[in-house]
Image (cartoon, helix red, strand yellow):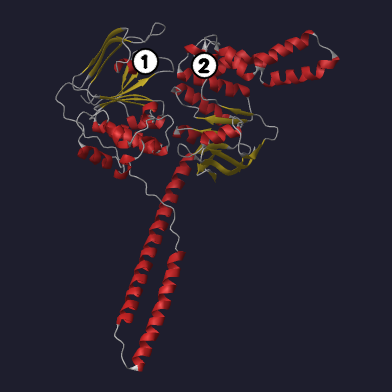
Amino acid sequence: MIVSNLNKRIGNKNILQDVSFILANNDKVGLVGVNGAGKSTLLKTLAKEIKPDNGKVRLNEETITYLKQEIPYIYNDLTVVQYIKQELKLDKLETRLHELETNLTADIMKEYGEVLNQYLTLEGYSFEENLKSILLGLNFKENINKKIKTLSGGQKIKVLLAIVLLQNADILLLDEPTNNLDMEAILYLEKKLKLANKKMMIVSHDEVFLNNIVNKIYELENGKIKVYNISYQEYLNQKELEYKDLKERYIKAQEQKDKLKHQVQKAKEWANKGVNKKAHNDNNKLANNYAKEKTNTSNISKLTKELEKIEIPDFEEKKPINVFFNLDEIKENKDIELEHLVCGYETFKTTEINLLIPYGIRVNIIGGNGTGKTTLIKTILKEISPIKGNVNIGSGVRIGYISQNTLDSALDESVYSYLTKDLKNIDKAKVFTLLDKFSIDYDDKDKSYLSLSPGERTRVNLAKLAINNINVLILDEVTNHLDKEALDLIYDLVKSYKGTIISISHNRKYNEYLNSDLDLDIKTGKIIQRRLLKK
């Protein structure tokens, strides 16, 4: 694949600016950049899902496949196998082959050969066998004749991944392929991609996944691509070195500029003193003063030119990662108990769960896609009623719920309004103190929440929890769709938080920081105690 001078403008923003690169044999590229940098736009442009304003994407007889993000509602009543066949166009190829084979003549042999070749490329004759093998690897255990509308979000992602893997294309474009996947599926996909002799470009929030697969990093910033021929971890190390070098050059340039400004100021003060001296009749003194003044003026001009030549690098100091919770010393009961709990709906229910969650414990809810992890969370939050049993929540419990959606809440209001809208008695001093604790600039309080970067929005959301003295955090796949800055904040949160955490995540780095006290297998109700409880 040869990409030449791609440009794409959306609204008033240049998303892609003269983007050029070559995707060569065995290139497994991690495409990185902050949220909004244009990563998805670039992938869609390469996949011809959207048209560039100008530029070219040339394929040398290569086939390309792009991982779609969702299954449209119009296909809800199709079965899994029907939908996949339709997306691969196998159904049309099968129909046409049957039509041609029933009346095979010399005139249509060329078309028959072309259609048959397409069918064989997709391994049509072993389609169902291959499909079942891939779905089994992805830990998809539902019947392939089950309707799309009955699947969970993670199960739908597995269907979309199966389509990509079945196409057997030369180039894979994968946008957040691990979102909502369970660990078994992530490990299978990781192994499959690592061993595949294919070109690929991957956008992923899962740093371990990226580090285990890619051999190159394309960094997209301000519409331009910068290439790093190294692994993801090496890229992170390189970026840290670049940051330190830029900071040193910025400080040095500022110091040099300040020094010259001081010299210019002193020279001007000296010149003014010479002008203000009383004139004397002594011609030699007048001549001497004139010479000094001329020399001083020349020196000022020289210093001013040197000052103008100094270029200050474009540098912004990283905000320190600071997650601060001053939890209330509430004397009331802060435990949560799941007592003979069965939750779900008419068509699905979990096994019975019995679990006491003492205050300060970290619980990791584990299980494959569609086993009821989020259903359990919604039951604890009292968004749905249990089928059987009880959720007993202590009177001192203050729950804060964070999911990938609440971290990116689309609200057209100021930061200050967003932080305080649910508070009955607003303590402005406390709010402003917490802004500082979370490294949020005071001047940002009047900014629109929507105008903030994902990392800044994450800081604001965490500050909101701290303002409300939340002592129980329920976190549901919070790492999805976040950029590096926001991810680091979440990692710091789960590492340092002293209250109770009930969590769902298949992000391996996140789970290392969580370091759960016990795992609850939602499918079996079994509790795996990882260490002695803190109670």
Task: Name the side, left or right, on which 230 lies relative to 291.
Answer: right
The disc labelled 2 sits on which kind of residue? Tyr
Residue found 24% across the figure and 28% down from its top: 470
Residue 167: x %, y % from top left: 62, 23
Task: Name the side, left or right, on which 173 lies relative to 291.
Answer: right
Residue found 77% across the figure and 12% down from its top: 100
Residue 242: x %, y % from top left: 45, 50
Residue 150: x %, y % from top left: 47, 11
Residue found 73% across the figure and 20% down from its top: 117
Q: Quadrant of the C terminus?
A: top left
For label 1, the residue is 375
Q: Which element type, helix, strand or loop, lies under badge 2?
A: helix
Whether residue 433 is situated above or below residue 131 in the rendered picture: below
For label 2, the residue is 73
The disc labelled 1 sits on which kind of residue? Thr
- Report the number of numbered marks: 2
